[in-house]
Image (cartoon, grey):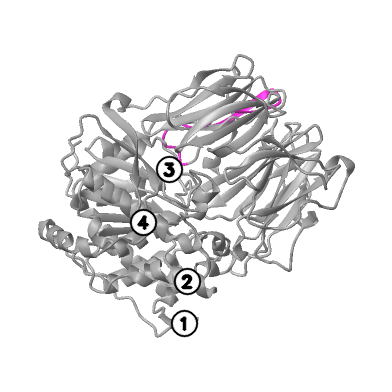
């Protein structure tokens, strides 16, 4: 996550001046009274009050009543925005076009996803050959009557006979597994419960998967996710007969995943311990072709180095790793000579390696060059053969395939380039458009995209992408939305969003800043935004806002900011540190209580990025920026629109509940301080309908807060 502190002194007069310019918000709000308790915790000698601890109990009648009261205020406010119905309709229009996923091959069949436009869930299709007639393989819209049950992961067996898949309900991270017979579309009796954060890895007549014990409260938001285990499920047998293949009772918060090679000769087991602050993983393997039942270590100990197996090449394991290579490399491990040094296949480069895969007897490797993708093709021995020419500066993903493939698919996008599926022919080294979307009411030529670099507080150059209408006047009056994430080694690449058109066509500037903490420039960039260095991320974001203002794209009274999850923490932190810099803020599903995040569901896994309040030194750093604990009494905040959902079992809604209650209690009521709590939804929208409703409400709030009346 991210953020930092800039000098307050020189901004004081600016803040006062802005206060005079800002018109009063049109609606007078009366917030629900939130009961306070005398809960106080001692952190290494520091007493910290937590008066709204009771809101952590999402199952209590009092919390339910509080949620209802808050939503009544929020939706009452939104209902008075005159243009909201028209904006909601516009958002719906912009999203209503067919959207396809890139095909993947299984034998002679190709599988792909398609959403006709407004379907709540994309449908999975199968067809024989690229010229065959598509048939529905699986329609997730039939999982539930309200469309909020989602398809998680889907894998087809090597022989193409079975399809295993998972289903989540109402936005939860909990999944249930099922198996379908591909030829008949018959769903079998296999019913696998309590899957979470797991892939499905086929091996012969069954698959590996990860599960947790059934929580005492069912879909409980208040308990930790501990004691994950790996099982093997054989088709046609009850879950009670599944074979336990890995557990670690001595380390209940460790996380595991299993994958198998394309030929299913080997299985790989990854073991991570992020709750112990470790960023890397141990790696083990089984020789399935020899019936091996024990896991043999490749890397026995968990440290900060990551090891991601790609494939077996001639009986040796190709592994992507950042061991002694912060920007990542590809290396070979010989299981027959486990004590021998690894040999580099593709050495580390100045650019960060984004991903790697094998297909058609080649290595296909993508790199990040100033946040945009470069794709290269290597021989299996690591000889560079050619670069894949992409349409421009943007993000490309895919490239995976099978050993006998003649071509692969990838998808390219940028802020003004809708996701387009390309077919890359391995022999001719040529790409061609396979499927391009037809988006009504969008003309790329009407907009301008650019990449800029700006200096953060410590002088570090930070990349940022902008898009706006052509002919923009740099007079400081443009409504602007600045978005960022900055954490967990995740890259925020420039990507198209049809919903964003609703902002751009009304004169908005959209900016996305690539803060430290992400993966944009490799592990060193990531580390510079973690634990005791987290303030760098906030500094990077604040500097982005100041650059936009200094270059007259916008001004504080026209600038809004947005981020979700780790990005929600970012927004909460920066509006505490520099509230006068922004007119409106939308923190979504944010990690707001930095002292207790590790006590809920999967929160312990975030210690590797954040540190922990249990550690005295890390507590001091965390406490200094925790959004919940740094709200200024009497402070005038940007108009704030907090979003969360009742089924968010990743960043539990208590984070946003306690943050909203504290903000409404302490901050000046000169601006709206609202929380929108969705139902039957989770860390991400559980359906297209939910996503469009949330987006329309956020955009309505932003237009209203920035004084922009959209014209339709």
Is 107 within the magenta?
yes
Residue in front for this viewpoint, 53 or 181: 53
Q: Report the side of 445 relative to 47 (left or right).
A: left
In magenta, the rendered stretch is: 101-120
Q: CA distance from mark 1 to mark 4?
A: 29 Å
Q: Secondary structure at mark 1?
A: strand
Q: Where, quadrant-wise, is the N terminus in this rendering?
A: bottom left
Q: Secondary structure at mark 2?
A: loop
Q: Quadrant of residue 2?
A: bottom left
Q: Secondary structure at mark 4?
A: helix
Q: Residue placed at 62% from the left, 31% from the top?
A: 400
What residue would you read off at disc 4? 539
Is 159 within the magenta?
no
Q: Residue placed at 27% from the left, 27% from the top?
A: 446
Tell me the mark number nearer the camera, choosing from 4 and 2: 4
What residue would you read off at disc 2? 595
Q: Earlier in the sequence, mark 4 or mark 2?
A: 4
Q: CA distance from mark 3 to mark 4?
A: 35 Å
Instruction: Look at the image and tell me whether residue 583 can be seen.
Output: yes
What residue would you read off at disc 3? 688
Q: Earlier in the sequence, mark 2 or mark 1?
A: 1
Name the disc covering residue 41, or none.
1
Residue in front for this viewpoint, 434 or 251: 251
């Amino acid at each position: 996550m991210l953020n930092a502190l800039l000098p307050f002194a020189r901004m004081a007069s600016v803040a006062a001046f802005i206060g005079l310019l800002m018109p009063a918000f049109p609606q007078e709000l009366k917030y629900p009274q939130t009961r306070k308790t005398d809960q106080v915790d001692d952190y290494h000698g520091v007493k910290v009050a937590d008066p709204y601890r009771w809101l952590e109990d999402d199952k209590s009648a009092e919390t339910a009543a509080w949620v209802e009261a808050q939503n009544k205020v929020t939706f009452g406010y939104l209902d008075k925005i005159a243009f909201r119905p028209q904006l909601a309709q516009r958002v719906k229009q912009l999203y209503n076009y067919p959207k396809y996923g890139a095909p993947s091959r299984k034998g002679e069949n190709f599988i792909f996803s398609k959403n006709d436009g407004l379907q709540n869930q994309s449908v999975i299709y199968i067809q024989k050959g690229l010229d065959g007639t598509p048939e529905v393989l699986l329609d997730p819209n039939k999982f539930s009557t309200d469309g909020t049950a989602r398809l998680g992961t889907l894998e087809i067996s090597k022989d193409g006979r079975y399809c295993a898949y998972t289903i989540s309900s109402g936005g939860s991270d909990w999944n249930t597994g099922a198996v379908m017979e591909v030829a008949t579309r018959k769903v079998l009796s296999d019913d696998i419960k309590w899957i979470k954060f797991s892939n499905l890895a086929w091996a012969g007549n069954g698959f590996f998967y990860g599960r947790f014990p059934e929580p005492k409260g069912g879909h409980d938001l208040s308990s930790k996710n501990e004691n994950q285990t790996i099982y093997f499920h054989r088709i046609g047998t009850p879950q009670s007969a599944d074979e336990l293949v890995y557990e670690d009772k001595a380390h209940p918060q460790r996380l595991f995943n299993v994958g198998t090679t394309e030929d299913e000769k080997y299985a790989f087991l990854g073991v991570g311990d992020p709750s112990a602050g470790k960023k890397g993983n141990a790696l083990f393997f089984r020789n399935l072709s020899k019936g091996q039942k024990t896991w043999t270590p490749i890397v026995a100990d968990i440290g900060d180095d990551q090891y991601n197996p790609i494939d077996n090449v001639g009986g040796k394991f190709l592994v992507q790793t950042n061991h002694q290579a912060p920007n990542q490399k590809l290396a070979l491990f010989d299981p027959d000579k486990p004590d021998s040094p690894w040999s580099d296949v593709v050495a580390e480069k100045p650019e960060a390696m984004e991903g790697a895969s094998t297909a058609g007897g080649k290595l296909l490797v993508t790199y990040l060059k100033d946040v945009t993708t470069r794709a290269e093709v290597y021989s299996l021995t690591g000889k560079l053969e050619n670069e894949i020419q992409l349409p421009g500066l943007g993000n490309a993903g895919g490239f995976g395939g099978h050993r006998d493939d003649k071509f692969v698919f990838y998808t390219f996008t940028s802020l003004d380039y809708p996701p387009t599926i390309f077919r890359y022919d391995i022999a001719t080294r040529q790409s061609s458009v396979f499927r391009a979307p037809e988006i009504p009411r969008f003309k790329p030529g009407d907009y301008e995209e650019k990449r800029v670099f700006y200096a953060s507080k410590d002088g570090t150059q930070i990349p940022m992408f902008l898009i706006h209408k052509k002919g923009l006047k740099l007079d400081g009056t443009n409504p602007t939305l600045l978005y960022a994430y900055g954490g967990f080694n995740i890259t925020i690449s420039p990507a198209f969003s049809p919903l964003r058109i609703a902002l751009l066509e009304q004169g908005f500037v959209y900016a996305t800043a690539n803060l430290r903490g992400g993966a944009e420039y490799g592990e060193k960039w990531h580390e510079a935004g973690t634990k005791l260095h987290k303030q760098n991320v906030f500094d990077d974001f604040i500097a982005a806002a100041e650059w936009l203002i200094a270059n007259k794209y916008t001004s504080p009274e026209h600038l809004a900011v947005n981020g979700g999850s780790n990005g929600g923490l970012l927004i909460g932190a920066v509006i505490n540190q520099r509230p006068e810099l922004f007119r409106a803020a939308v923190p979504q599903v944010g990690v707001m209580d930095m002292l207790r995040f590790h006590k809920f569901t999967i929160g312990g896994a975030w210690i590797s990025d954040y540190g922990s309040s249990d550690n005295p030194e890390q507590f001091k750093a965390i406490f200094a920026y925790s959004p919940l604990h740094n709200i200024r009494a009497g402070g005038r905040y940007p108009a704030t629109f907090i979003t969360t959902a009742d089924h968010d079992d990743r960043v539990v809604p208590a984070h946003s509940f306690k943050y909203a209650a504290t903000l409404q209690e302490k901050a000046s009521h000169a601006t709206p301080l609202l929380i929108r709590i969705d139902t039957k939804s989770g860390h991400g929208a559980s359906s297209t309908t939910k996503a469009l409703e949330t987006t329309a409400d956020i955009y309505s709030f932003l237009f209203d807060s920035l004084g922009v009346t959209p014209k339709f």
